[in-house]
Image (cartoon, helix red, strand yellow):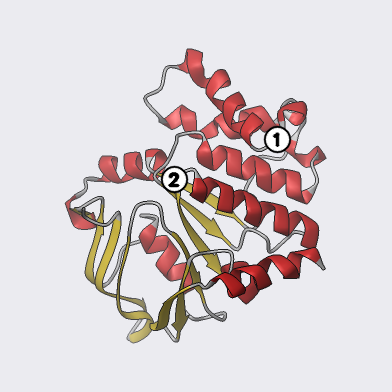
Amino acid sequence: MMPLIELKNISKSYSDGDVETPALSDISFAIEQGEFVAIMGPSGSGKSTLLHILGFLDGQTKGEYFFGGKKMGDYSKEELAHVRNKEMGFIFQSFNLLPRTTVLENVKLPLFYSKIKESSWDRIAMDAIEMVGLAHRANHLSSQLSGGEKQRTAIARALVNSPQVIFADEPTGNLDSKSGGQIMEFLEKLNDMGHTIILITHETYTAEYSKRIIHLKDGKIESDKKVDHDHRRRGKDHFMK
């Protein structure tokens, strides 16, 4: 079976006049459906650039990116937008919620760009909200929520279109230890349910919730290893302190 995601010799550079600044260099790896992969590295290692390419938010300078067996360059703009909305869910450190809008309205937002009948939107959004345990907060404004509740709302929004892959970009960065642990445990649960999870992080204890860690340094892959049971235990222990 073909991998869900495959990168072949991906490089990315940014131009500023005559100056070329490399961000990624010769990146190659594959991610199978149902994997939980952490992409980690220090600031400036290329994590955000790689996330933007994986999520169809930016294009590479060189190399080939295949999603579901189809080369990124073969998608039309309309197809890229459809895949990004239907097959990909995004969770960000800053939550990216509309502050004067209810939890329900925030979670429904991706459905506005889907082909799902509007009459079904409330039911589908409430199913996602119930999954993250926020049914009692569905009609509260997102500005009235705690940090952990905001991130759970963002997770519900990411789930509402039943995506194949969920990108979590530093999802615990703005949370206290307890809330961060709950979010990571929830991502584990989603992975157990069959969702592919790609976690972007600079924190080792967060990455150790995954089953595989790809470590970037200076825009290159430094290592690509499976996570053993003891490492996963240490990640959980951090959030219990």
Cβ–Cβ under 8 Å for marks 2 and 1: no
| 175, above or below 223, in the image | above
Image coordinates of residue 211 in percent, x first then y, are 49, 65
Is residue 87 something that shows in the picture? yes
Image coordinates of residue 177 in percent, x first then y, are 78, 62
The residue that appears at 43% across and 69% down in the rendered structure is: 49
Which of pointers 2 and 1 lies earlier in the amino acid sequence?
1
Secondary element under disc 2, as helix, strand or loop, is loop
Give, as a three-letter code, the residue at label 2. Answer: Gly
Tag count: 2
Is residue 16 something that shows in the picture? no
In the picture provided, is 7 more to the left or to the right than 142? left
Observer-nearest of 9 and 44? 9
| Residue sticking out furthest to the front | 229
Give, as a three-letter code, the residue at label 1. Answer: Gly
Q: Mark 2 against mark 1, which lies toward the viewer? A: 2
Secondary element under disc 1, as helix, strand or loop, is loop
**Residue under pointer 1:** 133
| 18, above or below 28, in the image | below
Observer-nearest of 77 and 32? 32
**Residue under pointer 2:** 194
The residue that appears at 40% across and 52% down in the rendered structure is: 34
Image coordinates of residue 184 in percent, x first then y, are 64, 56
- Looking at the rendered image, the quarter that the C terminus falls into is bottom right
Q: Distance between the residues labelled 2 and 1?
A: 19 Å
Q: How crowded is mark 2: few (under 14 residues within 10 Å), some or many (20 or more)?
A: some
Image coordinates of residue 23 in percent, x first then y, are 40, 79
The residue that appears at 54% across and 32% down in the rendered structure is: 109
In the picture provided, is 70 more to the left or to the right than 113? left
